[in-house]
Amino acid sequence: MSVSPGDQGPWWQAQAMALAVEAQRRERRQGTVLIIVSAVFVAVSLLCMFVGVLRLIGLVCLVFFGACLFGGILKRRDSNSRTTFVLTLWVALLMGLGMGLMFIFTLASALTYGASGHQIVVLVVAAIGFLFFGIGAMVALVKAGRTGREARDQWQSRRPHGPTGR
């Protein structure tokens, strides 16, 4: 059985549309899971902040998992929106802040009480997280600003200057 050439277009369009809808559902499910898991960690972080010894750990976890919670909320939104893009960059900056705080607090602990093998692993992970989330988000934010500025400059250069004769 063969399909006539005129019928191929709508079939491929329907198939592409079904795949896009399934991808959106998967993204929304992942966002929901991220919201639930992050909310649990945020609640635990708040409890840790009330325990005297765990205040700094609670603060680091609150910043990092609060950003993850916000990221899950953004994941359920329209991913093609400019607002979502900018807010996602701010979430990455918050995650970088959390990683930076973890690095600073672990380094202070290692300098005060002596470094152990576990602290070195945490320092390496925090440094990589800070570079990826913090520095990477700043670079992406600057690049997005330049791209927007270049598009605006191109639009203004094509605009007619002076009276248009209307």
Image (tube, rainbow, N blue to C red):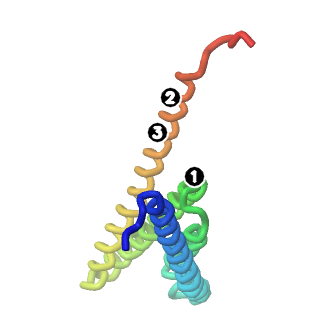
Question: Label 3 is placed on what type of residue?
Answer: Arg
Q: Earlier in the sequence, mark 2 or mark 3?
A: 3
Give above or below for 92 relative to 150: below
- Quadrant hosting residue 162: top right
Residue 49 visible in the shown view: no
Q: Position of residue 92 (x, y in %)?
A: 48, 63
Residue 5 versus residue 81: which sits nearer the camera? 5
* Furthest residue toward left: 117
The residue sitting at 50% across, 58% down in the picture is 89
The circle drawn on residue 146 is 3
Q: Is residue 112 left or right of residue 78?
A: left
Question: Label 1 is placed on what type of residue?
Answer: Arg
Give the Cα distance between marks 2 and 3. Answer: 12 Å
Q: Is residue 64 left or right of residue 121?
A: right
Q: For mark 1, what is the residue?
A: 82
Q: Position of residue 44 (x, y in %)?
A: 57, 88
* Quadrant (top left/top right/bottom left/bottom right) for the C terminus: top right
* Quadrant (top left/top right/bottom left/bottom right) for the N terminus: bottom left
